[in-house]
Image (cartoon, rainbow, N blue to C red):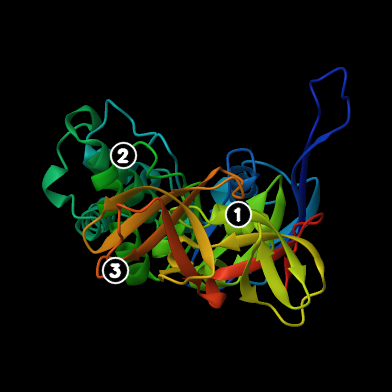
Amino acid sequence: MKVVLENLTKKFPSRDKKHPEDVIAVKDFDYTVKDGTLVGLLGPSGCGKSTTLNLISGLEKPTVGKIYFGDDDVTKIPPENRGIGLVFQNYALYPHLTVRQNILFPLQNLKGKDKMTKQAMETAALNVAKLVQIENLMERRPAELSGGQQQRVAIARALVKMPKVLLLDEPLSNLDARLRLQTREEIRRIQKETKITTIFVTHDQEEAMSICDEIVVMKDGVVHQTGAPQSVYDDPKNLFVAKFLGMPQINVFEGEVKAGKLVIGKEEVLDVKGVRDGKVYVGIRPEGFKPADDGAFSAELERVEILGRDISVICKSDLSQSGMIRAIVSSENLIDTTKSTVSFNLNPSKVFLFDDKSEERLF
């Protein structure tokens, strides 16, 4: 099911007497979720991603704009009639019901032509339990389950009606690191098997980039960039997107372009022909540094962290916005830790220039 968001805007009345103007949670959101894809709404807390999900689900009504499921305008249709499955951050399972009863609950509330026989409901519940691999837990209650198992029950309950659209609101935030990794892989597997259009809200860029077909990067209710995860990572439109995506975070410097040369501090570190002269912000991905004895860029060596396959080289730098530089290099590179400085050449494809005022990307 294709989902179309058309000029979607949501305003909330202000509760601040000193600033009585409305709070804009989502502003002019235009986007199409392709049929059968998994899309991540990604951004920091307060960016409007959960509000957007609530608008799609019908839990919130837009101030302006329309929502389409396929060719059907569902903007004014109540949540129960939209054909959605919704998974919350806190699972929202009924504690007094067994796993089987929790999964069956949405089917038992179907009426009219959608009403199912008891045998059909039992079959549907068992099939979806097998899909999320909890068929051996059907008689347990939520309190007897781990966090990951409870999340699987919540997903099964959302899937049992085979919704047109599956909505996931921070579904992994309550899980530990290992379980998060396992569960996000399960979400991707389930989505591929069912081919249900899925919208996934998260503030964790690693989660979004690892399982989503496309990501929507948001800030202050505004969409900053959309696209395939790797494409957005490799080609950020502005400094916010560049800083938000990537772990470790991109290194940001204040630099200057002079006669086709990028200058950081007093060093000419890269040829940037065609870029206008002037001050710029320079973003360098951690993997964009290449150790070289006569490298164009140098910094004060702080320490080296051995990560197995890679090495993390930590440097001090007054030129960096954070005061530090983190470079990720292959473990095949030998870093002389007896020296106080380390030199690098820069990979041009991992260096981005941004306007020093608008922070938009300079191409």
Please state which of residues 207 and 192 is positioned toward the viewer in this rendering. 207
Residue 34 appears left or right of 192 = right
State the image quarter where residue 25 is shown.
top right
Q: Which mark is residue 333?
A: 3
The amino acid type of the residue labelled 3 equals Asn
- Residue 140: image x %, image y %? 16, 35
The amino acid type of the residue labelled 2 equals Leu
State the image quarter where residue 184 is shown.
bottom left
The residue tagged 2 is: 175
Q: How far is the residue under mark 1 from the one under mark 2? A: 32 Å
SS state under label 2:
loop
SS state under label 1:
strand
- Residue 258: image x %, image y %? 77, 71
The residue tagged 1 is: 252
Residue 67 appears left or right of 316 = right
Q: Badge 3: how crowded within 10 Å, few (<14), some, or many (20+)? A: few
Marked residue nearer the N-terminal end (3 or 2)? 2
Disc 1 or disc 2, which is closer to the eye? 1
Q: Badge 2: how crowded within 10 Å, few (<14), some, or many (20+)? A: some
